[in-house]
Amino acid sequence: MSLAALVAARETGKARPEHMVALARDAVARRDGEIKAFCHVAAEPEISAEGPLAGVAIGVKDIFDTFDMPTTYGSRAYTGHRPMTDAAIVALARRRGGTILGKTVTTEFAYFDPGPTVNPHNTAHTPGGSSSGSAAAVAAGMVPAAIGTQTGGSIVRPASFCGVAGYKPSFRLLPTTGMKHFSPSLDTVGLFAATISDVALFAHLLTGRPLNPEPVDITSTRIGIYFCGELETANAEMQGALERAAEAATAAGFRLVAINEPEENARARAAHATLQNFEAGMSCGPDLALFEEQLSDKLKLVLRDGLATPPSVYDDARRAAKRGRGATRRLFDEVDVLLTPSAPGAAPAGLSFTGDPRFNKLWTLMGTPTVNIPFFKDKSGLPLGIQAVGRFGQDLRLLSVARALEQAFAA
């Protein structure tokens, strides 16, 4: 579903909010038995006739509290849990007129233990994680917009695997109050929609911020191809997709620059796991103490690792992150946007592994805005996403350039 097309139909009187929501409810009824993107669907969702998101059916990752639906954080330990209030991002969506259609599947505590969701492009493949259900629900045409989170690569990677636009804003642009935190200095609320135009419109209507893409002066826009130490680990088809993206950008008139990864950024990427795991031990250690028998082995392992990490090691990781942020700021003196793979390749086969976030976690740690540009496919037809990265706080600029690149790829 195109959010932009639905909103345009509403604005011209061709679609009423109740009809827009009914369209999504029908799609969920027809498709979710196979895709399993939702863990709970509202029996009688509230439909507003007012507000910029009126009639927009939204899937919300089950890592966010909802007062009127169960919130399990993807864990058996929280079966039947009913919070008293909404998470801030859910409340914001309701105030703007959006309809919370249901809760989408998350990996347990938004870590790596997967749920039942499958990839709509090939149900034998993972949709990615941890925002599995949100990405798959949009890709399967069940909802025009969905909300997720990213701590390592949990917006951009599933967006890449499912062939949709996934936007991770600058850190703290969207509120995290009322979500189950894993690593508070990394946890970032993000959004899914079909295309760059759609996800930018969703961000604009949701926040009231000027995030709808603007025209770009292509000839003065500098695009950096980011040559990090991980690039050679991407498979041949993903490397080929990045090369085709660079060729299309050049043909469209963008100025391309080769950017070698600063050593500070390589060290920051290596520090991500230490920082994440230490904070996970602090945030979710109480769950381990109370519900150990109900948590997955993967989750218990990382929480124990975090609890065993000395504070001095965590502080070293924080210092590495700070130095990386300084190097990243200097990078954006040379370019406007960086391009990298969104993932090492297409969605892996099987449902036990949600994919590797190696191309995403640095930018989560840096707090910079990123977005998956969906266009390319591998030989089997599975999506291959290109990740665009912008300067911290320049989300509108990133989304505007990403839309222009998406158009260039399709030319």
Image: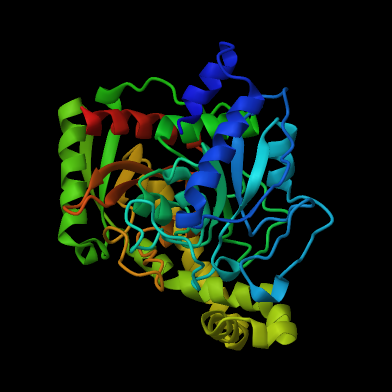
Instruction: Specify the quadrant of the image occupied by residue 371.
Output: top left
Q: Position of residue 8 (x, y in %)?
A: 52, 18
Q: Is residue 21 left or right of residue 79?
A: left
Given the current orientation, which residue lies at the most extreme top position? Answer: 12
Residue drawn at point x = 63 percent, y = 44 percent = 174
Q: Nearer the viewer, residue 55 or 277?
A: 55
Q: Position of residue 164 (x, y in %)?
A: 39, 43
- Can the viewer see residue 169 in this picture? no
Residue drawn at point x = 68 percent, y = 58 percent = 179
Residue drawn at point x = 47 percent, y = 48 percent = 31
Q: Is residue 331 left or right of residue 69?
A: left
Asked which colour scheme the image uses, the reply is: rainbow
Q: Nearer the viewer, residue 358 or 298?
A: 298
Above or below, 210 relative to 364: above
Q: Is residue 221 left or right of residue 294?
A: left
Q: Quadrant of the image for the C terminus?
A: top left
Q: Nearer the viewer, residue 110 or 98?
A: 98
Q: Position of residue 98 (x, y in %)?
A: 67, 34
